[in-house]
Image: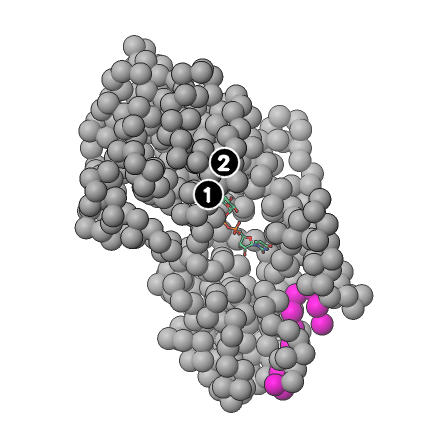
Amino acid sequence: MKIAIIGTGYVGLVSGTCFSEFGHNVVCVDKDEKKIEALKNGQIPIYEPGLDELVKSNVEANRLIFTLDTAFAIKDADAVFIAVGTPTSRRGDGYADLSYVYAAAKELAGHLNGYTVIVDKSTVPVGTARQVKRIIKGTNPKADFDMASNPEFLREGAAISDFMKPDRVVVGVESKKAEEVLRNIYKPLYLIETPMVVTNLETAELIKYASNAFLAVKISYINDMANLCEKVGADIVALAKGMGLDNRIGSKFLHAGPGYGGSCFPKDTLALSKTAQEHGAGLRLVESAIEINSAQKARMVKKIREALGGSEAGKTIACLGLTFKPETDDMRQAQSVAILPALVDKGARVRAHDPHGMAEAKKMMPEVEYADDAYGACKDADAVILMTEWNEYRALDLDRLAETMKGKIFIDLRNVYEPEVLREKGFQYFGVGRN
Ligand code: UDX
């Protein structure tokens, strides 16, 4: 099959590459000349494990092409996936900005030839696919096309395996013909018996938001519970284990921490709650999850201050990890960005390290100093914060750390270490939801 992907951001690039790995002929188009030039030269603009090899092998096999030319990408395509960004609107009202989606729809409409399925891949509020359909019809009344919605459920850092071995594929369609095209595109997944959920356009759009919001609620629930654990002397890690072994609850997304970040949960929970309010069906649980998540970041600042004896002024604080989670270089809505500048504001000196996030972090937080490795960040520090649970911070040489640091305060915002192990090494240990 011939597939066009509009937008080579995270979702477009991963989806296009994986479709080509399935054996389809994929053309990815973007407006960003530098990005397309880099991709043509095998340079991947994001850090995603395994993606560079996959791009390289499919480009070499002539199944994956990058271009600036929309007409060329769309010509003869069986399906066109719209995978452009849907950031939070600049108006600051929490709504998703759909201008890129609508502009893509308008542009592609004129180039359609023969029957084509237009697929919304970007995370878009319910009703967007119908609006895209209206735009295409209005721009090119003769176009022979069907509209579809096919949300992605990729996690950064695990995107390739999430795409190749998904729990499910969700497809919103209005015709059997469009369903058939999408079934053919995802055929390789039948071999591993991936369920395909076929719905109408609105349901597919909402499944994505409802799933992300549910996971966000789960995280905020455990973070709220962590706060209670600290007050009553319970241990959140054991509590989450005790809860998670109940199959009805499940152990995933029950890790207490500094709150969720990233390009999806903060944006999608906000957009969903706005849509719900607009329809007079406010989602109070989702609204609470948003509130708890922002309070959690403030709680972390307070925790750090208290660990330092009530004031961070004049203290040197090391921070290990800056990205919103490990295995990505993505700093969007990273917890560190909410926490570290607040410490510097109160007179702390912060020195940080991250395996892949420092280039971006330097632009976002020039007030922070940066070190080449974990021990460099910890040199003569009064305290260390474990912000992001990169593997390389999971087995630190604690004797070396103790020698390197001036103070012996370990603030473990991801509950990676056992409190007793740190205490045996002479550290004061502060976790989230455990003492
Ligand atoms: C998420 C969804 O998982 C994915 O299906 C969707 O397509 C995009 O949004 P992603 O943002 O890449 O993926 O990361 P995810 O692994 O879900 O983590 C999101 C945030 O929640 C991170 O900041 C992570 O640190 C935090 N988190 C996650 C917790 O604090 N506790 C947990 O138990 C799980």
Numbered badge on residue 305 = none
Dominant SS type (magenta): loop
According to the picture, the residue beneath numbered tag 1 turns out to be 165
User: Depth check: 119 or 57 in front?
Assistant: 57
Callout 2 amino acid: Thr
- 364 is higher (above) or lower (below) than 20: below
Q: Residue at x 52, y 71 (%)?
A: 394
Q: Quadrant of the N terminus?
A: top left
Callout 1 amino acid: Lys
What is the basis of the colouring in this image?
A: one colour
View extreme (bottom): residue: 403
The question of residue 205 being in magenta is answered with no
**Residue 59 image-quadrant placement:** top left
Task: Please report the bounds of the magenta region as a residue range.
Answer: 425-435
Q: Are discs 2 and 1 less than 8 Å apart at CB?
A: yes
Q: Residue at x 43, y 59 (%)?
A: 327
Circle nearer the N terminus (2, 1): 1
Disc 1 crowd rating (10 Å Cα; few below 14, some 14-19, many 20+) is some
Q: Quadrant of the C terminus?
A: bottom right
- 364 is higher (above) or lower (below) than 209: below
Q: Element under label 1?
A: loop
According to the picture, the residue beneath numbered tag 2 turns out to be 194
What x and y, as percent, mark residue 296? 63, 58
